[in-house]
Image (cartoon, helix red, strand yellow):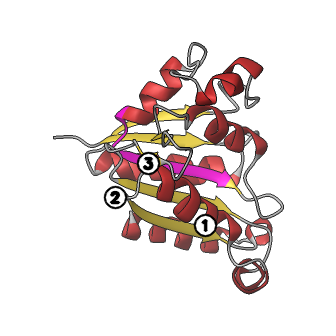
């Protein structure tokens, strides 16, 4: 049976390195038998701003998902999630952070405790999360100076709260702005080998 895979792409430029890496990854996963759905946040003009109604409903009986039904259903039905984005200022592009804020919603991605204690995971379908990101900085700055903030938020905060059982893999292309064609192709080979 084919694995349902949601690829979320977050880069504003159509001719970007992230776009190239995403196309290579999508082709690879399709060849492996994944049923791939691509969500390009910029191309779809996804609105990253949490509405007052959505925020107001966070602790009500039901989250106000009227503007997000399709996106929430995509996330909940995914068995594999692939995130492809540039790391800017050692964080997520705003549009991707907004997708987390709005789509990873209570009652769908996680459940609030009745006493407002620890939340419990709800993305039981999600078996694996694969991340590809590009950074302008060298690897040692991300790892030793900033302690890999993007990786920690994804693995510990987001998945730790919403999909504890999912396998997590992350590949980062450092100093991507000056990467040669050979370096990029070696990175693509790494994606094929690991994913």
The answer to whether the residue labelled 1 contacts the one labelled 3, judged by CB atoms less than 8 Å apart, is no
Q: In percent of the image, x 78 and y 81: which residue is there?
A: 141
Q: Is residue 173 above or below residue 31?
A: below
Give the farthest residue toward the front: 115
Q: CA distance from mark 3 to mark 2?
A: 12 Å
* Residue 83 magenta: yes
Magenta stretch secondary structure, dominant: strand
For the residues labelled 2 and 1, say whether their Cβ atoms are less than 8 Å apart.
no
Is residue 155 in view from this perspective? yes
Residue of label 3: 120
| 133 sits to left or right of 50 | left
Picture quadrant of residue 33: top left
Q: How would you rate the neighbour count of disc 1 (Cα within 10 Å): few for under 14, some for 14-19, many for 20 or more?
A: many
Q: Position of residue 150 (x, y in %)?
A: 67, 63
| Chain-order first, disc 2 or disc 1 | 1
Q: Which mark is residue 151?
A: 1
Q: Which mark is residue 193?
A: none
Which residue is at the far left? 1
The residue under label 2 is 165
Q: What residue sits 44% from the left and 55% below the top?
A: 129
Looking at the rendered structure, the secondary structure element under dot 1 is helix
Q: In the image, is residue 19 part of the stretch drawn in magenta?
A: no
In the image, taking residue 193 as reference, residue 138 lies left or right, namely right
Q: Residue 138, percent across and down?
A: 76, 80
Q: Residue at x 51, y 22 (%)?
A: 61
- Which structural element holds mark 2? loop
Q: Of circles 3 and 2, which is in front? A: 3
Dividing the picture into quadrants, the one containing residue 195 is bottom left
Gap between marks 1 and 3 measured at Cα = 21 Å
Residue shown at the point (44%, 63%) measured from the top left: 168
Q: Vertically, is 188 above or below 182?
A: above
Residue range corresponding to the magenta coloring: 77-85
């Amino acid at each position: 049976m084919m694995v349902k895979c949601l690829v979320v792409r977050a880069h504003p430029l159509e001719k970007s390195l992230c776009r190239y890496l995403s196309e290579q990854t999508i082709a690879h996963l399709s060849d492996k038998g994944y049923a791939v759905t691509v969500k390009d946040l910029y191309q779809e003009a996804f609105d990253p701003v949490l509405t007052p109604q959505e925020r107001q409903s966070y602790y009500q009986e039901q989250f106000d998902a009227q503007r997000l039904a399709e996106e929430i259903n995509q996330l909940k039905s995914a068995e594999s999630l692939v995130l492809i984005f540039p790391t800017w200022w050692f964080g997520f592009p705003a549009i991707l952070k907004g997708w987390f804020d709005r789509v990873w919603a209570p009652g769908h991605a996680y459940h609030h405790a009745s006493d407002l204690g620890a939340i419990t995971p709800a993305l039981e379908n999600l078996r694996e999360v694969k991340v590809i990101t590009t950074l302008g900085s060298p690897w040692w700055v991300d790892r030793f100076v900033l302690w890999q903030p993007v990786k920690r938020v994804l693995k510990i905060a987001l998945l730790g709260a919403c999909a504890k059982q999912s396998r997590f893999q992350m590949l980062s292309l450092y100093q991507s702005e000056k990467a040669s064609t050979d370096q990029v192709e070696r990175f693509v080979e790494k994606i094929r080998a690991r994913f």
